[in-house]
Each structure stands twice: as C-alpha cells, then as structure tokens.
Image (tube, rainbow, N blue to C red):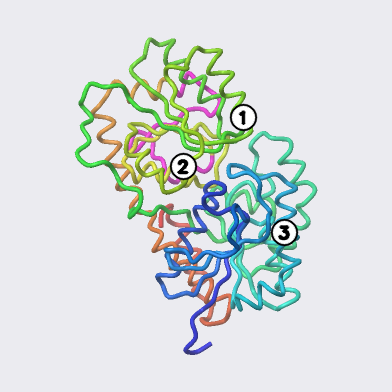
Amino acid sequence: MTGKKLKVLMVNYEFPPIGGGGGTTTRFVAKYMSRLGVDVDVITSKPGKDDFFSHPDGFNLYYAGHTKNKISGTHVPELARFALTLIYYSKQIIKRSKPDLIHCFFTLPSGSFGLYCKKVFKIPYIVSALGADVPGFNIGDWRLDAYHALTKFISKSIWNNSSYVVANSKSLQETCKEFSPDHDIDIITNGVDTEVFYPAQNKDFTKNKDINILFVSRLMLQKGVDTLIRTMHALKERNINNFNLTIVGEGHLKNIMFTLIEEYNLKEKINYLGWKDLEELPDIYRKADIFILPSVMEGMSSVVLQAMASGLPIVASRVKGFEEVLEENVNGLFAEYNNPNEFAHAIEKLIKSPELRGKMSSNSIKKANQFSWENIAKRYLELYEMSVGLINGNGLKNKLVASQGSSKHC
C-alpha cells in the first residue's frame, strides 16, 4: 500500500438527516478522517432521490436503495432490509469503493455487511458499538430485549471476526464485556465539532427573563419523554413559572407526549419544533439556557456534548453513559432518571442562580473541548492501520487501551 491512500468504507444505516447520535458520529469521524488524508466512502440508507452525494466535508456519500421511510426512527424490518440490500449489492459496492477496511457503525445491521465482506472478499473490518446495538443495553423496553435475544448469536459472530470492537464509553465497554467477557473492547468516545457547536457571544446570565430549557432527542422510551413532561408539571407545582421548554425531536411517543402536555395544562410553556436537521441545531442550542436529558440509559450522548460545547449547564439522569461527560455541580446536575421531582429540584436550583448557570456554562465549554473529533479520528486511524497491517499492533494497542482506560476524555 506504499504511496497509496488508505481507503475506508464506513457503513451506517443512519446518517444525517436520518437518525440520531450514531449518524452524527459517522459524519464527523468521516469528516476528520478525510482531513487526516484517508480516502473515505460512506454508505447509508436512502432518504431521497439521489444515489450519490459528494459531501462538502470531504468524503463520498452513497445510498443503499430505498431502505428508510422515517427520518426520526428505525424499525427492525428496515434494519433487516438495509443489511440484506448491502449484502445483495456487495460485489458492486466493493468494486466501486475498493476499500482496504470497512468501518461498521453499530453491530447490527452494519456489522453483518462487514462480516460478509470479510468472509467473501477478505476485507478486514472494525465495529463501533454505540449503545442499543449491544446485547444487555437495558432501556426497559421488552422489544429491544427480544431483538437482542434473537440476534445475539449474529452479534457474537460479528465481534469474533472483526479486527477491533470499539465502545464509545467506559460504561458501554462494561456492557460489552458482560455480553462477551473474553473480548478485548477498546474505548473511543464520541466527540463534538466545536467549529459547528459553540456558545452565544456575550450571554448575560443575570438578565431577568424566562429561562429556556432545551430537550433534543428522539421521542422514545429510552430518552425519558414522560419524565420530561412530568418535570415541567413539577416545576409549576413549585410555583416556578419563569421557564419555557423547547422540544426538538420526532418519535413514536409524540402522541403520548402531547397527551401529557394537555393533561398537565402545559401548552403555553412548551415550544415543539419537531425534527431539525443537524445544521439547524447550533442556533437552537445557543438560544437555550439549560439542557435536559432524562434518559433511562445512554452509551455516550452526542446531543449532550453539543449542548456542552454550546455553553449549556446539563441536567441529566444518574445513569450509565453520563458520568463521563457530566460532573456534579461542575457543569451540571444529576437526578434519578424516573423522578420528575428530582429533575424539577435541579432545574429550580439553576433557574434561581444565574451565577451557578454562568459557572456551569464556562465549565461545559472547557469540558467539551476535551472531546475533539480530530483526536478521536487519530485514535481510529491507529486501529485502521493496525487492522490492515500498516503498523505493528504489539505494544501500540496496549498503549491505546491503557490510555483509554485511565482517562475519561479524549
């Protein structure tokens, strides 16, 4: 491969504007990997008419048939259709892309394509495990548990044949190890692009105004949508009325959410914006004062990192996945994931103390700067080069694992 660019094919069933944090991760890894001189192709679900798009961030974006119906969510039949479509067209995909390595974002469905290409075309692949694709990732939804029960043998085979399996947080690494104790699991966190997400200039925290609380996520069980609305009701019950809640997202719990809003007479307090493209989010963050995410469980939340980079104090659940980005009383506050009163208490504390919001805003910005996509891309590049034999993994892999295990940040 001397004198030739490393060619990597990234695979993910979601990519902006489709999906959530997993798609955002793929986009920014591709962007910063391209800046490091890697020749990157991305293949994903088709949301529109085009089959190919030369992305302004420096990589090629290809679409795999009509495999996606909704922007905000994905159902199991769509996951299966994406996997089968890629395998069916695999010969054409590999002939066009000519990859030295395949990077699969999510174990399933993307990893099934990596496994197939390893067996048929002898192309190595790595897997980024990002959360709900890991068996044992418990969000209290029996459908996800049933899905994992039916597919865990495929997931195990995908991991066993990959060059590396990467978790995006220490807590997710622990879940991975519970599923597959003998597997070496590397940690490379998610990141945030501070060229895109940055704070509003000259924000006055002492100004007497209504506080804008922001929630950005898919409207699904994992993200604690019911706790979110009940928290706003608990604030009103405490006679805290100088707030508004902006909700950005779509999902199958939208109707239930609006039922709760109606039940608690919160319509005048809530501004629902629906689904927004990634390019629209920075301005929305900059107009907010507090970010809330009452999730049941997380791998590592991209939207929390975006909120931090935008200078927002964070109020989040005391669950795995947040402890690596949120520091109690430093850049945010914790509350029990299903306890609206605890969330209301945390938000009340921030509403009543402009000084605390200002301090946490500064700390969020500092902390977000530790999650640089450029550094993350460099760490992935080391795995790429070891996977294709460009560098010797002896010692370097141990060094990488040790550095990830000893530090929570990039």
The residue range painted magenta reads: 320-343
Judged left or right of residue 263, residue 266 is left
Q: Is residue 328 magenta?
A: yes
Residue 262 spot, x, y in % from top left: 54, 15
Disc number lying in front (1 or 2): 1
Disc 1 is placed on an element classified as loop
Mark 1 neighbour density, 10 Å: few (under 14) some (14–19) many (20 or more): some
The one of 80 and 47 positioned closer to us in this rendering = 47
Q: CA distance from mark 1 to mark 2?
A: 26 Å
Mark 2 neighbour density, 10 Å: few (under 14) some (14–19) many (20 or more): some
Q: Amino acid at mark 1?
A: Leu
Q: Residue furthest bottom?
A: 2
Judged left or right of residue 204, residue 272 is right
Look at the picture and state if 22 lies above or below 402: above
Disc 3 is placed on an element classified as helix
Q: Amino acid at mark 3?
A: Ala
Residue that carries the numbered disc 1 in the rendered image: 253
Residue 247 spot, x, y in % from top left: 47, 31
Judged left or right of residue 164, residue 201 is left
Label annotation for residue 83: 3
Q: CA distance from mark 2 to mark 3?
A: 33 Å
- Residue 372 in view here: yes
Q: CA distance from mark 3 to mark 1?
A: 26 Å
Residue 52 spot, x, y in % from top left: 56, 65
Q: Is residue 73 magenta?
A: no
Q: Residue at x 43, y 26 (%)?
A: 271
Look at the picture and state if 360 lies above or below 396: above
- Marked residue nearer the N-terminal end (3 or 1): 3
